[in-house]
Image (cartoon, helix red, strand yellow):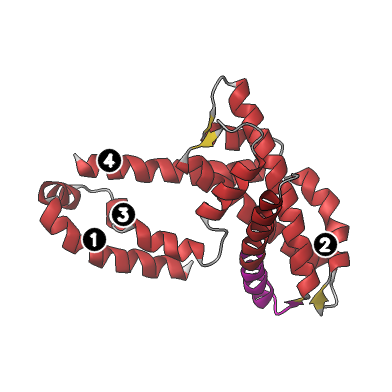
Amino acid sequence: MPPQQTTSNASRVTGVGKGNRATTTSASRKRSAPDPRADELRGDPFEDEDEDRAKSIPAELLTLLLHEFFAKDGTRITKDANAAVAKYMDVFIREAIARSAAERERGGFLEVEDLEKIAPQLLLDM
Amino acid sequence: MAEPSDEERRERLKSALWYHVGKIVDEESLKRRRNATPQFIGSLTELVITQVENIAQDLEGFSRHAGRTTVNTDDVLLLARRNADLHNIIKDYVDELKADKAKRSTKKR
């Protein structure tokens, strides 16, 4: 995905400035490490989140929705688990659209009836 | 349910979800040079809400079964147990999150 590349580039630039001040030792450790992935390490988590949020359901909204449907008040969810559910729902939505589009081969507008046709199998598959 | 504030909050959540589902539909249909009716987006939003409701109850059940009150990533993986491809997607994503976290915590030290 090209957008991700640009983010990692941008965050690397901001990350360097921060790294120099706060964690000089870890920065030098990073440089000496042969691991090529160390370069791709995202320095600024907020930038990445923005990129994700533009095209997916925001984590905060999903948290609110999940808590709306938890039967017991004491139930909580970890941040990672919430992000994983967001990924799951992202797959769900895109799969629904892809199957609807495949249902209507001739082109034109995706209609409710296309969704109605693919929904039962989609729900079984998820 | 009887309280109007609950109803209101749910409606607001639905509106927020509608907006984001609409964005994803726009993006996906643009990719395919297609278009979707507003009714399609509305129905998809309803489908998504229903699925989130089912998921929430499953996750809660899974965590309670494990003797926890907090839902963790293992519960989410269990959610995708019947679809190997989906399971792999979620597993890769969770592993990525964990690797990121590990790197970040070693960086701090």
Amino acid at circle 4: Ser
What is the distance, in whole Å, between disc 3 and disc 2 at their CAs? 40 Å
x, y (%) of residue B82?
72, 36
Q: Is residue A94 left or right of residue A125?
A: left
**Do the CB atoms of the residues marked 3 and 1 lie less than 8 Å apart?**
yes
Of mark 3 and mark 2, the one earlier in the sequence is 3
Instruction: Write down the residue under mark 1.
Output: A15
Foreground: disc 3 or disc 1:
1
Query: What residue is drawn where x is 37% and y is 63%?
Result: A47
Question: Mark 2 is on which residue type?
Answer: Leu
Residue at x 59% of width, y 42% of height: A67
User: Marks 1 and 4, how far apart in space?
Assistant: 15 Å
Q: Amino acid at mark 3?
A: Leu
Q: Name the residue tied to disc 3.
A: A41
* Subunit bearing disc 3: A
Q: Is residue B10 above or below residue B2?
A: below
Q: Which residue is mark 4?
A: B105
Q: Secondary structure at mark 3?
A: loop
Mark 1: which secondary structure? helix
Residue range of the region highlighted in magenta in the rendering: B20-35
Q: Earlier in the sequence, mark 1 or mark 2?
A: 1
User: Few, some or many C-alpha atoms within 10 Å of disc 2 (few <14, some 14-19, many ≥20)?
Assistant: many
User: Residue A46's x, y, as percent?
Assistant: 36, 59
Mark 2 — residue?
A115
Position in image of residue A39 (x %, y %) = 27, 57
Indicate the quadrant containing the C terminus of chain A: top left, top right, bottom left or bottom right. top right
Q: CA distance from mark 3 to mark 1?
A: 9 Å
Question: Residue visible at 41% across and 40% down?
Answer: B98
